Image (spheres, helix red, strand yellow):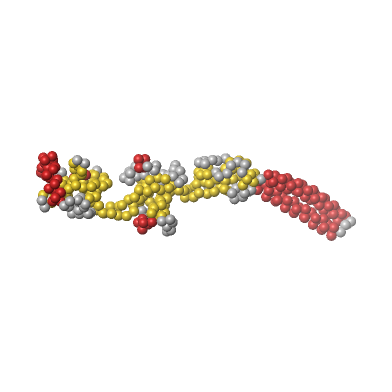
Amino acid sequence: MSRSLPSRPALGRAFLAAALLAVGSVASSGRASAEELVVHLTEIPDTKAVFAEVESRTVIPARARISGTLREVKVTEGSEVKEGEEIALVVDDKLALTLNAAEAKIKELNSQLENAKTELDRANQLLSRGVTSQSRVDTAKTQFDVAANQVAAAEADRAVVVQRAKEGAVLAPADGRVLTVPVTVGSVVLAGDTIARITSGQYYLRLSLPERYAANIKEGGTVRIGARGISQVTAGDAETAREGKIVKVYPEITGGRVIADVDVAGLGDYFVNERTLVWIEIGKRKALFVPLAAVSTHHGVDYVRIVSAEGPLDVAVVLGEALEKNGKTDVEVLTGLDDGDRVILP
C-alpha cells in the first residue's frame, strides 16, 4: 500500500526527538513484553450503502365489469381484502328498464303459449272424434312448439339482464391490501375501468445501481438490510443488519442503472415503494488490518509501532473501519504500513 509520509528513518528521528521524552517509560515497558505480528494484505468484500425500494410481487387491478355509475365504494387505501369480496357497486339504471321489458315479453309469450296449448288440445279432441284432419293437429303442435321456444328464449334474455345486474358488484381479484382507489362515488365508469389496485404476494426489495457495478452484481449474492428507516441512525450499520439474497438481476440497463431484486423476509408491514438502507457487495479489495490494541494515539495522531532496521519505530497511520471477529477487534490501516511489516504488539 502506498504511503504519503516521510521516510521512516526521518520520521523516526523526528518523532523520537519530540515524543520519547513523554512516552519513553511506557515504550520501554512495552518493548520488554512485546510480541510481533507480520501484517499481510487481506482480501475483503467492498460494500456500498444504497437505498432500495419495497415492491410487491403482484399488483392486481379490481375492474368494473359493466358500465354505469359507481353507487358505493366499500374500501379505502390500506384496507385488507379477501378474494371474491365485494369492494364496490356499479349500477346501470338502464338494466332495470331492460329487465322490466324482458318480464313483459315473457308474460306476452306465456299467453301465446297458453293459447297454442288450448288449440293443440282442441285439435287432438277433434281428431279423436274423426272431425278434423291430422294436418290440423300437426299445425297446432308446431305453433305450440314455437311458442314454447319463444318463452325459453325470452327467459334466457331475462337471465342475461339479471346476470349483468349482478356483475355490477366489483370483486377483489385476490387476497391483499388496497393500494389506491382512483375513483369516487358518483363517478361514471366503463367496463374494464380500474376501481382499486390491490397488492398481493410477497414483498421484495428492488435495487437500482450505477452501471459500473453491473459486472459485480450476481444472483445469489448477499445483501444486508438495515432496520426500517432511511437514515444511518435508524437503519444501523452493516454488522447488525439482516441478510437478503439477490434473486434476479435484470439483463437490461436503463438510464445507466442496473436493476436487481432482493428476497428478504419480514417486509409485510412496509409501505409499497418505501425506501430502506441496504449494503451490497460490489467487489473485493485488499486491505491491511492490525489489532486495535496495537494502535496508540498521541496528540490526536494514531501510531503503530513496527520493527525497522533502526529498531522499534512508531509510524503515523490513518485508520479505516474496524471489524470485530471472535471477540477481537481489528482495524484497517489505510496508509502508513506496507505488506509484510512487523508490528509490535503491547
Residue 78 screen position, x and y as percent: 50, 41
Judged left or right of residue 316, residue 218 is right
Residue 300 visible from this viewpoint? yes
Residue 315 screen position, x and y as percent: 17, 48
Q: In the depicted view, which residue is nearer to us: 112 or 170? A: 170
Residue 26 visible from this viewpoint? no
Judged left or right of residue 95, residue 342 is left
Instruction: Report the quarter where the N terminus lies.
Output: bottom left
Instruction: Determine whether 87 is above or below 246 in the image.
Output: above
Q: In the depicted view, which residue is nearer to us: 299 or 63? A: 299
Q: In the depicted view, which residue is nearer to us: 266 or 293? A: 293
Q: Residue at x 76, y 46 (%)?
A: 104
Residue 210 screen position, x and y as percent: 38, 54
Instruction: Report the quarter where the C terminus lies.
Output: top left
Residue lying at the far bottom of the rendered structure: 135
Residue 188 screen position, x and y as percent: 63, 45
